Amino acid sequence: MPESRPVDPYPPLAWSGWGDPTQVPLLPDAVRELLAQGLGVRAPATGAASLEAVTLPEPRLAGSVRQALESVIGPEHVLADHESRVRHTRGKSTPDLLRIRAGEASDAPDLVLVPGSHEEVIELLALCSSHRVAVVPFGGGTSVVGGLAPEADGFSGLAAIDLRRMNALLSVDGVSRLAELEPGLRGPEAEALLGEHGYTIGHFPQSFEYATVGGFAAARSSGQASAGYGRFDELVLGLRLATPVGTLALGRAPRSAAGPDLRQLVLGSEGAFGVITGLTVAVRPTPAERVYEGWRLGSFKEGMAVLRALVQDGPRPTVLRLSDEAETGLNLARPSEVGGPAAGGVLAIVGYEGTAQDVATRRSAGTEVLSGAGGQLEQGAGEHWARERYRGPYLRDALLAAGALVETLETVTFWSSVPRLYEAVSGALRESLSARGTPPVVLCHVSHVYPAGASLYFTVACAQTDDPVAQWRAAKASASDAILDAGGSITHHHGVGTDHREWYGREIGELGVGLLQAVKARLDPAGIMNPGVLVSPSD
Amino acid sequence: MPESRPVDPYPPLAWSGWGDPTQVPLLPDAVRELLAQGLGVRAPATGAASLEAVTLPEPRLAGSVRQALESVIGPEHVLADHESRVRHTRGKSTPDLLRIRAGEASDAPDLVLVPGSHEEVIELLALCSSHRVAVVPFGGGTSVVGGLAPEADGFSGLAAIDLRRMNALLSVDGVSRLAELEPGLRGPEAEALLGEHGYTIGHFPQSFEYATVGGFAAARSSGQASAGYGRFDELVLGLRLATPVGTLALGRAPRSAAGPDLRQLVLGSEGAFGVITGLTVAVRPTPAERVYEGWRLGSFKEGMAVLRALVQDGPRPTVLRLSDEAETGLNLARPSEVGGPAAGGVLAIVGYEGTAQDVATRRSAGTEVLSGAGGQLEQGAGEHWARERYRGPYLRDALLAAGALVETLETVTFWSSVPRLYEAVSGALRESLSARGTPPVVLCHVSHVYPAGASLYFTVACAQTDDPVAQWRAAKASASDAILDAGGSITHHHGVGTDHREWYGREIGELGVGLLQAVKARLDPAGIMNPGVLVSPSD
């Protein structure tokens, strides 16, 4: 087959918020009332800066280096204009949004490089390495952990490598059910191109609409349908990494005993070892049927026991998610209805995707398990969740603009430690924010399940103090300490970036960090690749 | 729970063959006739050496070093007697057996160290590192790829670390379905201890009776029931590695986005980075029912299409295996009946394990798929396979003693490349051995299946030449070249060892090898850990 590309490339993310600015909801008066009365949120004194008013650092890169880079990919693919630099500054965490809305873009790259092929990336990296130019690989720009904010001090400059032009579906192998993709394809683009062949990847994280497949791989993404399709790192069976010292090409088979699985060393490397320029991913036939149900269960504890039973003993649904009492009460599973009437118990979302027969069989068995546990089917809740599944970040935009501090964080551990982890993280967030005079609401849901454990996804909202970035940093540090103390992993699917580096180092220990530094030194001897992401730049 | 240990530790492997010497079958006259007439096999002129007559190298290790090692674990756990040294020489490949039966034990360790704890292993490795003593971790001793034959030239000596005393089941977490195991537990021992709690690991490779769980992890083992339970590297969710520079402890959750999955860097490291001293593995309830069926299908090609349909679209059996025409004809799926009447077509083994209801559901759907493809259920063939599933290596012992050269090798690739790989490897083996005047029979079966691909397991038999070790090395090299040329991985479940190192290097490329060397240099700066395994010792 000839390679295919998206006909209408997806629009870029809003520079100072999530996605399409026209999609940000208006907050109902009831919600504003609730924010003011319940959390003491006050409208901010100043509005957000305009794009033009954002302050950029002076470009540092020498003209001769820029010319050398231009000679590789053409001057038209080397961008240094104000808007391009602003749009490639950091990612989409709440601190990122707060800072860029305040007009602060001190982490902006000097240049944005837009290569068209693996070979061009290889040449760019070799040049940047020899001129000590720090490089941040840039896919969808959706990192929420500082993965796009490298520590470029001490380098001669910072270049973003934007992968938007490398967005082809290269091949489909229907016998092996594999597809070769370039990294710059956004989620919906990849699904549309594969859909023409009758396939899906089945990877639908909340960032789906804007994140790229290269980013899914680099950050070990996990989607909302991971119970059925698996995590992205399980779906990647082959990959190509461009590094400053050459190419690493891996994956001759689904699994192998040929030494350590080096694919699993590249997956999750977050640009610190190189740029992922090609992926071979497992695909499945587009499901004939997709059904999502909402189930009301007695309590978070009871609900977790049901989820555990489903994932351990089956039938395994494709989507499994469970809100705690607070999240269920606030209806955050339905962002457009926040503040609506609360009901008792907790809400689980249970989805089935597959052939009609497969869905019917699993659904019937699943219904038996859920009913047997006292669950009540809630009409419309599943469909509602499916319709609203990518809307959460837009709600954050509206809440931030209204003066609230809103952010999410997540972790994962084995089932027997989940209750302890839940209490520890909720408690740490409440304590830290209350101590600053801004008592929060802390909501949680189980976002992903495995036979051996589950991830917890927390949403926090409170009033902003005068320095909301510092306010959140302190709360996040407390929560991160609590995660490690309770035996959890510092991140289930957001990644490490620069924000989690300190706790990540504690999680994998000195030797674990040493390993990564040794690998980085081999692939990136000048240390230019996303410095400060995963490991300290100067260690 | 208190830790538990095997009541009756499993007997050691025969020093010059597989397992329990009393289990080696007598070859029926028909088989001897077939070997003589069909392959020109002649009885060897000389019999195997006795244990006492095996020639060992002079011990090289200084007495002071030995004393230092004794001070860590006690002199009673430092063995240097003739039998201990012979029993820790190499593994169980055909060349290993041919050499040891000829009385040649040039790779024997100077000492066998038998530590009792992680802390003792750490101390031993630090001592060996400072005295430049090469170390080979020794579990079940079942390697068939030279994984127990380090290249210890240039070191002050060679010590085997035998993990037999580290054989406890430390804990069972029934909520998370996890068990903590020490590495020295053999397969049946681990299953017996877990069985008391109602659990199984579900890992049953052909080496099951003698290999250890630590070895399963170090070599990325895959069992006969991998379609149902997964590979061993998928079952390991936590591990502890003792290295010359300290401890690496990994695994706080089933899956995580906290950087690269470093567990997958230790799994498959084959002792080259350190000694695995603890494992947390996923367990499942002991299946209430186990059913194995034999299905006769039209051809290897047709059979592969059926296996692919089952693994891609379900129902997924627990065991899936398919012999090609030659193997089916020779009945090698039934070692005790080799030479019996051959039937047409090919034989698939299809097994289901689980609850009664789960087995009934999957079996009924599987029967529909198999019957729909023209398959005929073969009475008794499934049960026969299950009874004989660990007997293959005993048959090899008998055939080697009769003067035949018999060995196996395996590979894996994506489904669309499997036919090409099958032809290439069969052809290379036939060509190489025929060119030496010993035309072989080459048998093959699909041993493991994945949605995206399958492994091919080849058995080769021919007459021995005067130098059967060189004869096999040449054939194996041809087959290995063919594997790489056809896009396969050099090993699906046997591992790399020293035998596959050259081809492994070609498979992962210069940067891949460089990565491993960098990791090794960090964890094992003196290069003492299993030198020559995975990567060259001196690079």
Image (cartoon, coloured by chain):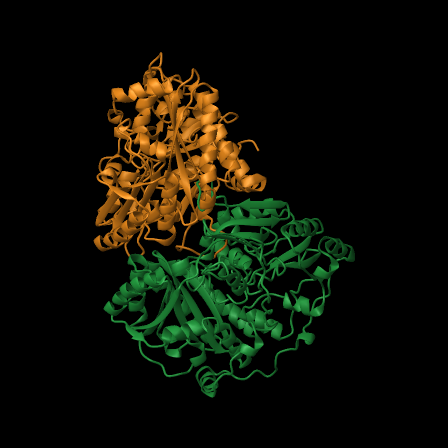
Chain colours: A orange, B green
Residue B519, image x, y percentages: 56, 46
- Image x and y of residue B294, in percent: 34, 72
Q: Is residue A456 left or right of residue A335?
A: right
| Residue found at the far top of this picture | A45
Quarter where residue A270 is shown: top left
Residue at 50% of width from left, 30% of height from top? Answer: A132
x and y, in percent, of residue B293 in the image: 35, 71
Depth order, front residue of A467/B353: B353
Question: Considering only vertical position in the picture, is A76 above or below A170?
Answer: above
Q: Can you say whether A24 is above or below B94 in the image?
A: above
Q: Quadrant of the C terminus of chain A?
A: top right
Q: Residue at x 28, y 57 (%)?
A: B313
Tell me the quarter of the picture where residue A147 sits. Answer: top left
Left or right: B200, with A118 as reference point: right
Q: Nearer the viewer, residue A455 or A49?
A: A455
Could you say which is closer to the camera, residue A431 or residue A283? A431
Left or right of residue B504, residue B445 in this image: left
Say whether residue A100 is left or right of residue B510. left
Position above or below: A344 against A84? below
